[in-house]
Image (cartoon, coloured by chain):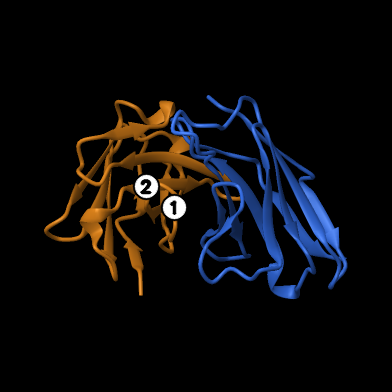
Amino acid sequence: DIVMTQTPLSSPVTLGQPASISCRSSQSLVHSDGNTYLSWFQQRPGQSPRLLIYEISNRFPGVPDRFSGSGAGTDFTLKISRVEAEDVGVYYCMQGTQFPRTFGQGTKVEIK
Amino acid sequence: EVQLLESGGGLVQPGGSLRLPCAASGFTFSNYAMTWVRQAPGKGLKWVSVISESGDDTYYEDSVKGRFTISRDDSRNMLYLQMNTLRDEDTAVYYCAKGWQLEQWGQGTLVTVST
């Protein structure tokens, strides 16, 4: 199975400041079709997860443009340009290249 | 508006069985693969299973292979997860999600396996 490792596991951030989460996979996520299936999800406290970013950098409809994804191969990053109060929660990366799909451990974003 | 509504959760003894339905609406159900993901209390997300648009292809996480069966009824816009030989470690909130990319998620249903 592909192991997904996120850092940091906790990220205290000042409102209005940027935040960055790293996700590393144990093997390349480039699929045989040429696409890279790396997604990011947000789970606010008490809520279901929500898709933010798919295929490394594509924002899902309705996701604010302060969220951006980047990376390639085995190293990926989610950035929040200016953290707002509603961004508090746990963020997960997930690889969709190979079965079984696997998630990172989650990164808790909280306000300082 | 896409809606996914899981049900069927509850308390079950180890070794028991449970079937989780997920009712879908607001999109053409038959055009989408459907996925189950679970989350143990206070823990992270764990992918469980997916079924293709046609229902011909199914995939499972290793720990549930042979015990869980995913299925779909496109005439009723329903997704199912049949869970047999349940173990303590299957205790979790179970979410259904739309598509290969998990585009939208239901609110989840809690399954507790305990004596």
Q: Residue at x 41, y 33 (%)?
A: B87
Task: Tell me the distance, in whole angstroms, between the alpha carbons under discs 1 and 2.
Answer: 7 Å
Q: Give the mark nearest the N terminus, 1 or 2.
A: 2
Q: Which residue is mark 2?
A: B35
Look at the picture and state if B96 lies above or below A103. below
Q: Residues within 10 Å of mark 2 (few under 14, many from 20)?
A: many
Q: Chain of mark 1?
A: B
Q: Is disc 1 in contact with disc 2, using a CB cutoff of under 8 Å?
A: yes
Q: Residue at x 25, y 47 (%)?
A: B53
Q: Position of residue B12 (x, y in %)?
A: 34, 45
Residue A13 left/right relative to B17: right
Q: Chain of mark 2?
A: B
User: Where does the C terminus of chain A fall, quadrant-wise?
Assistant: bottom right
Residue B63 left/right relative to B53: right
Nearer to me, B9 or B28? B28
Q: Position of residue A51 (x, y in %)?
A: 53, 58
Q: Which residue is mark 1?
A: B102
Look at the picture and state if B17 lies above or below B1. above
Numbered badge on residue B66: none
Note the chain letter of the orange one: B
The answer to whether residue B24 of the structure is visible from this angle is yes
Look at the numbered disc 2 and give the secondary structure of its residue: strand
Please name the color used to draw chain A: blue
Look at label 2 and name its amino acid.
Thr
Look at the numbered disc 1 and give the secondary structure of its residue: loop
Outermost residue toward the left in this view: B75
